[in-house]
Image: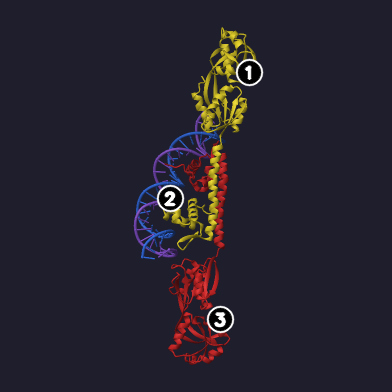
Chain colours: A yellow, B red, C blue, D purple
Amino acid sequence: MSAPNTSPASLNHRHLHYFWVVAKEGGISRAAERLGVAVQTISAQLKELEQSLGTTLFTQEGRRLVLTEAGRTALHYADQIFLLGEQLQEALQLQSAAASLKLTVGISDALPKLIAYRLLQAAIDLPQPVRLVCHEGEFDELLADLALHKLDVVLTDRPAGSRPNLRVYSHPLGECRMGVFATAELAARYGPGFPDSLNGAPLLLPTRDTALRGRIDAWLSARNLRPDVVGEFEDSALMMTFGRSGLGLFPAPTLLADALEEQFRARPVGGMEDVREQFYAISNERKIRHPAVEAIRQGAEKLPLG
Amino acid sequence: MSAPNTSPASLNHRHLHYFWVVAKEGGISRAAERLGVAVQTISAQLKELEQSLGTTLFTQEGRRLVLTEAGRTALHYADQIFLLGEQLQEALQLQSAAASLKLTVGISDALPKLIAYRLLQAAIDLPQPVRLVCHEGEFDELLADLALHKLDVVLTDRPAGSRPNLRVYSHPLGECRMGVFATAELAARYGPGFPDSLNGAPLLLPTRDTALRGRIDAWLSARNLRPDVVGEFEDSALMMTFGRSGLGLFPAPTLLADALEEQFRARPVGGMEDVREQFYAISNERKIRHPAVEAIRQGAEKLPLG
DNA sequence: CTCATGTTCAGTATTTTACGAAGTAATGAT
DNA sequence: ATCATTACTTCGTAAAATACTGAACATGAG
């Protein structure tokens, strides 16, 4: 319970400030001039301060005001108080200048790194500097970290289903058409006759627990295609790395065609109509408060993802 | 034309106080309860503080407010600032409690000590404790010290005449009838036939530079009395001490009859009609500001001096 | 004496602070 | 899922604190 307010009504900073300036300037008129305030005002406020403190701060000696003993004591404290006030403002100014916004983001393994990069670009491009901390991991782990506030946001390829104990919100960021890619050699062999050419073709796929895998399986079976699944990967970057070595064809966002050519020497083999990879930002709040996360969401709207 | 305002508008103490309490209480609602104001008020003032500081101090995490890094810095300073504020008030409270009012008084030699004591009684009896510093001396010396602010007031038996370079003000305190006193033996001898018995009687008198001496001389000559002036004294107490030894009769305020009997074994010999000793307080100010001096002046009005 | 400084007062304007009502979010219970 | 609860915000207006004008007055200094 709050104590019976032994603490005397906290002293008025404005009054103290006037007192301080008057003491520094050595007179009410000069203080009034410096403060841009009428002398009567200062005189009255000084009186109120003296009343609230229960002491007289100045005595009129001759034609000038002279600090009393109590006044000198008060001035001593006021000096320190206002010094601290200035230091506080300086400290925060420095801090905010140096303080880049910190964005701790979890990136789902299944999300192509390049997509993640393009999404995060919006945050990096914010006027204020952003310090990015990226964690990669499995979807569930990331959600757990998010709930514990160890992450500000999770970027992933699917919304967070309704979970009993987890209160998280999925913000759709967009989607992107998928295609099949491979090394130039494999592309030359399987490109013609696509998609029928996929029958028996060596194919790398995401693991079954990803959103994308289900859509690809559906797409294949709708066309009665039976590729030879030579590898399954949780991490799409790992899949592409294997694909680069010529182990098999692999699915990827068509959007990334150029980047895949450059980084993985991969050529497009064919498009997978209807199969789209979706992207979500998952946060703890229905309404996104973190400015960098909001930047990501807004940036995604304009991004040519699909 | 708002200048770049290098000097940051001095931060609002009230805002900072609200921030401080919110941080301490861990929430706006609890802070509002403790401060006895509405939550909206605090919320708004917090926003203004954040704006004025250019940083956000709290983030809403779930349903509670959590200090940001800047907020923690600000809290650190606020702690010190409000600690100082409390200390300031405490210090002044102690100081004013212990700080007895200091009254430096000059007492003219010619003024009877007992009169001085009775005059000062009013100051001593003030509700606030008074620390008395008494200086005795000659009238002119005391006036000089007064002008130098080494004395708050001079108690004397005459007003300060208009002096060219001295700006002092005489406040009449009252007057008191005079009588002639002596040891029991002398009183028995000279009492009968008073005042004619004074002819040839051994008499002690104040020196010629006192106000009282002039009046006594006038009184004597008006009655054609020629006493034998066996001693002149600047200090009335010294005169009475000699009188106590039986050296001669001496004048004194009739008011002090009881005290003279007790202290100096002196008996009244007779009264001196028309001779009165007057008392004045001399100060540097036309209007008395020193509360103890004012108490003396007021106390003298009620005192049975005459 | 005059000038500079400070006090006091009355009446009014401006700024700051406060609050009621309504709204948004997150949370926990049914 | 729906709903009440808690916590905070926003908006518009009311109350309070602060400031100003203008004028009279006190006092000490030159």
* Amino acid type, label 3: Leu
CB under 8 Å between discs 2 and 1? no
In the depicted structure, whether residue A35 falls above or below residue A105: below
Marks 3/2: CA–CA distance: 62 Å
- Viewport quadrant of the N terminus of chain B: top left
Residue highlighted by disc 2: A36
* Chain bearing mark 2: A
Q: Is residue A223 visible?
A: yes
Q: Of residues C22 and B163, which is closer to you in this image?
A: B163
* Residue A219 in which image quadrant: top right
Give residue A290's position: percent from left, percent from top.
53, 33
* Chain bearing mark 3: B
Asked whether, in this view, residue A193 is left or right of residue C18, the answer is right
Marks 3/1: CA–CA distance: 118 Å
* Amino acid type, label 2: Gly
Asked whether, in this view, residue B274 is left or right of residue A91, the answer is left
The label nearer to you, 3 versus 1, is: 3
Residue highlighted by disc 1: A241
Residue highlighted by disc 3: B238
